[in-house]
Each structure stands twice: as structure tokens, then as C-alpha cells.
Image: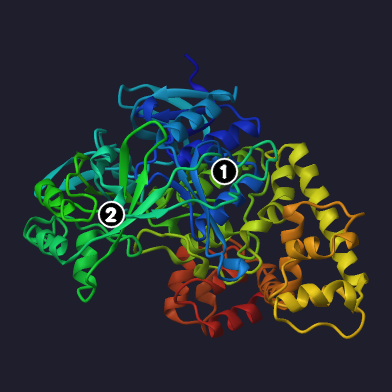
Amino acid sequence: MQKNYDIIVVGAGHAGCEAAASAACMGKSVLLITMNMQTIAQMSCNPAMGGVAKGQILREIDALGGFSAEITDKTTLQFRMLNRSKGAAMWSPRAQSDRHKFAWEWRKKLESIPNVDFWQEMVSELIIDDHTVKGVITAMGISFYAKAVILTNGTFLNGKIHIGEKQFGGGRTGEAAAKGITEQLVSLGFTAGRMKTGTPPRVDGRSLDYSKMEVQNGDENPSKFSYDTKILPVQNQLPCFITYTNQEVHDILKTGFDQSPMYQGRIQGLGPRYCPSIEDKINRFAERERHQIFVEPEGADTVEMYVNGFSTSLPENVQYDALKKIPGFENVKVFRPGYAIEYDFFPPTQLFPSLETKRISNLYFAGQINGTTGYEEAACQGLMAGINAVRKINNETPIILSRNEAYIGVLIDDLVNKGTDEPYRMFTSRAEYRILLRQDNADIRLSKCGFEIGLLPENRWNRVMEKQQMTQQMIQFFTETSLVPEDINPYLVSLDTAPIPQKTRLSQIILRPQVQIKELLIAIPQYFETLKFDDEVLEQVEIGFKYAAYIEREHVVAEKMKNLEDIVIRPDFDYERVSSISSEAKEKLKNIQPQNLGQASRISGVSASDISILMVYLTK
């Protein structure tokens, strides 16, 4: 039995899968240790990927050479582009996934990578020597050694499940909690905390009356997440459904509040503000007479349905009685009740931006262990931890994505500089450069990085360069080509926008909000006959023209911030010598250990005047 590896990944959730795959594809030997080989890449909560900001992250993972987007496309039941009525920065792809096929496709992908080995068991201890991790020890006392270890423990560290007044240990329903690692890390000086999350009941779709619900279909012309042209969009989409709670539902749920673990104080962990339980909604939004419920299929070959919006830890009999009062649920059969789970996490200010821990060299944290929530947030952390563990072994500098390069950069920067006092979830509002970080241009932003570090295949990089070339040619064509009034005016008049009195450049016509580039191709096809392009190119061109001023403004702001990023702060810098900065700033700066002035400027408690003083001091 092999016991020596380059990298050991502990946990096979979304973070662990991406970490193992990226490290192995970059040429390292990887051991992926999981408590249960049957639950690799398990979708523990909702059977969906993407959504607001999360869809952008999936496309970024794909552009770098990760696999979550590809797996999602292969298992999509329904695809929707959210926020189409808003600006391009808000467009967010979302897919309803086949839960079982998703996990199976991930396992097949990992098993197809020769450098990945598997071991099914719980890890109870890390092997530490001279403040450097050397491997792990399993519950059976078996030692495995490695040059780096990545912990992606999810909700399993001292996990505790709550249903009403019942509570029992577990990292997920039917699975044991992981013990030993938290206690060891705390003994080594790490700070640990508790967080909580919840999940709704799963029900038998055959027992529901869908005629009483609103049908929610996928897009008529669905797109996909991966930029790989060999992967096709979903066919034969399945519908989702929408229904609502009512006052009778709320009254029944209230009868169980005195048995709720949350209201009785048995759950102490920090909960997700943006994904509240149904009892939270009733309590916090007492003025609302109803709350939306999404009824989502768990797979193409199962009758199991996910009751999105009804996350709860109330007693199972209260859950059942309340569900029966929801329109369409009158004869519902429940497969399993909802529950809450609390678990250990480690405040991520204890990490470098590479996701390596500050206290123990070559030890990396990724996913919910860092206080995040969501498959996409976990997957991108796993990807970056895998990349940076490989680069650390190779004595190369880590890959640190900036806030104007990727949502992944925003997420990690927020975590390591600000920490989190609730499960961290990505939103477009967290990104100050969201016009730059659109879902449509992730390949242009990040594929070069993925190719240069050895993750993205050469054919994918060549495709990106071809796309950029076609885009530039199309932009040049729009800038140089003029339209005569008799060719374009019938189309403009049909849109209730002013006709042109004389020759006008295409670049001016496309700026009109009523004008869409695809419609132009139909209205004046003779102008585009010699051009080579596809839908992705057309989208880039249209967004580039219509949002040019906003894009340029963000580039200018980002460039100014880059000047701060270029001012390096040595690891041994003594902040006590800078008497003019505040005591709070000194404490935060010593704790976070920022690597440059830009990072220092984003730490909570460090003021603009503190940064100005530091800048003078550092540039002397």
C-alpha cells in the first residue's frame, strides 16, 4: 500500500474534488481521503449549481481548467440565465442538476485521472513536525505522508444534527461526524468557531398536485457553463414549480417554535443570513402573508423533489402538518424531514491569500472549514488550494487572483482580510469591479493563467485566442463601417427609434438601447457576409460597445488600486515602529500580515489615514 504522496486532500466534497483534480492534473501524486466513497461530490443541500455571482464563479473555474462547470453541464436538468432584464454584469447562469448523476460524473472524472488515489476512512490527526505538516493519521491508526495537506472537511468537523428536540452527531444525515482535527488545531494555536446551516424536507413528487403550482420552465435556447465546445447545452429540460406558504402554514409552524433548537438556544453556531430557515422568515418578516416555495426535481430518474425555501429544523410532525397546508402539497409524502447542522470552522483570517495556513506550513484550508457556504464557493477554494499547494512544492510563487480579475479573487480576498461572522456567500454586490467580472468573459480573463500553470488544455487556450481575434475584427468592422439610411432606417423605425439622415457608423447604431446585434444581422445581412463570428463573439462585441464607459471607468479604478498592490510589505515588518497609525490598525495588521499595501487597505479597522501613513513609511 502506497503511503507517500505529494498532496493529501481530506474530504471529497466540492472543494476536495477540485483540489484533488487540479493538483493531479498539474502532475502531482494525490491521495483523496473520504469517509464514504459513495458520497463523493454529494450535493448535500439543493440540487442546483450557479445562480447570482455563483454562476460567474463556475465559469471562472472552467476558464482556469477546473471541472465543476463541465460536470454541471453533463448533468443539467434545466438551465436559466437569471437577471436578463438587468445589465450584463448581473446576468447569472443557473442549472438545476441531477443530484445522483452529478456525484457519479465527478467520481468518474477523478477515477480517470491516473495521479489520484483514494482511501475511505476518517482522518483523526495531522502529522506535524517543526510547524510543517507532513501527513495525516486515520482513525485506524494508518499514517499517510505528503509534502502538503489540504483540509476540505465541509460540515463534518464535530458536526451535530438537530431536528426539533432531537440532536445527534453527524456531518450529514446518515453519516458520522469527524473528530480530532479541531482539537489538535486548537492546541496548535488556531482559533475555531461554530456555524450552522439547514436543509429542507425531501418529498415524493408523485404525491404532489402540480396543477396548483406555477410552472417554471428553463430558457427556450439554453446556454451552458463550460467554454469547452465539445460539451453541448441541455436537451429535454425538466420544469420546476413555484407555490407559496400561507397564514395557516405559518400558524402551524409557530406551534413548534418552543421545540425549535434555534429558539431554545441549543444551536449556538452562526447562521446564514441570506438563506434563512422558514421559521426565521416567519419570525423576521412577520408582516408577510406568504413566502415563495420552489419545488425542484432531484433527478431525471427519481420522483424525489427538493422543497427549496422550506429549510427547517422544527420537529418532523410540525414540518409534515405545515407542508400539507401548502397548495399542491395536500397529500404530500415525506421522504425525510429537514434538519439543521452545526459544525466547526476556522476563521479564514488565519490564512494567507494562497489559502495556506499561517501557523502550519504546507497546510491548506478550503471550503466550509473557512466559513463559506455554497458548492461554488467551496469548489473555487479547492481549485486554488490545489493549484497553490502544487506551486509551493515546486518552489513557485502562489497564484493570487486580484479583485478585478475574478469573483474567486474577491471571495478569497474578503475571507483572508475581513474574515466572516456568518456563512459567507458570494453576491455580485461584493465585487466593486463587477462590470469587468461578467459571466460571459471569464475565459478571456482567466484562461491564460490556467494554460500557463498547466491546467487548461492547449486546444482550449487556442479557442480563447481565436475568440479574442474574431472579437477584435468585429469591433474594428463596427468602428470602420458606415450604414446608408435606406438600408438601416426600416429596422430603426420598427423599433420606434429615430432614423438616420445620413451615413452613420455601425458603432454608433449599436449604442442605441433598442438595437440588438443579432437583430442587426437579420436586418442588414449583406454587411456581415465576409465576417467570421459566433454567438459568444457577438455578445462580447455588443457588451463592449454598450458598456464601454463603465468598463473603462472600472479599469481606471483598478489600475489605481494596483499601485497599492505593488507596494510590498515584508513579513517581518514591525508595525509598532509606525507610531502614527491607530492601535486597532496595528492589531489587525499584525494579525492578518498583509503582503502588500492594497491588501492592507481592505482590512476592517484599517482606515484610509492609516494606509496613507503606511505608504509614506514604506516608500521612504
Q: Amino acid at mark 1?
A: Ala
Quadrant for residue 178, please give it.
top left
Mark 1 / mark 2, whichever is N-terminal: 1
Relative vertical location of residue 534 with respect to residue 263 in this rendering, above or below: above
Residue 366 x, y percent position in the rendering: 46, 47
Relative vertical location of residue 538 with respect to residue 123 in this rendering, above or below: below
Relative vertical location of residue 6 with respect to residue 73 in this rendering, above or below: above
Badge 2 marks a residue whose secondary structure is helix
Residue on which disc 1 sits: 69
Quadrant for residue 157, please give it.
top left
The answer to whether any part of residue 559 appears in the image is yes
Front: mark 1 or 2: 2
Residue on which disc 2 sits: 212
Quadrant for residue 252, please give it.
bottom left
Relative vertical location of residue 57 with respect to residue 111 in this rendering, above or below: below
- Taking the view exactly as shown, the residue that stands out farthest to the top is 1
Q: In front: 332, or 263? A: 332
User: Disc 1 vs disc 2: Cβ atoms closer than 8 Å?
Assistant: no
Q: In front: 364, or 288? A: 288
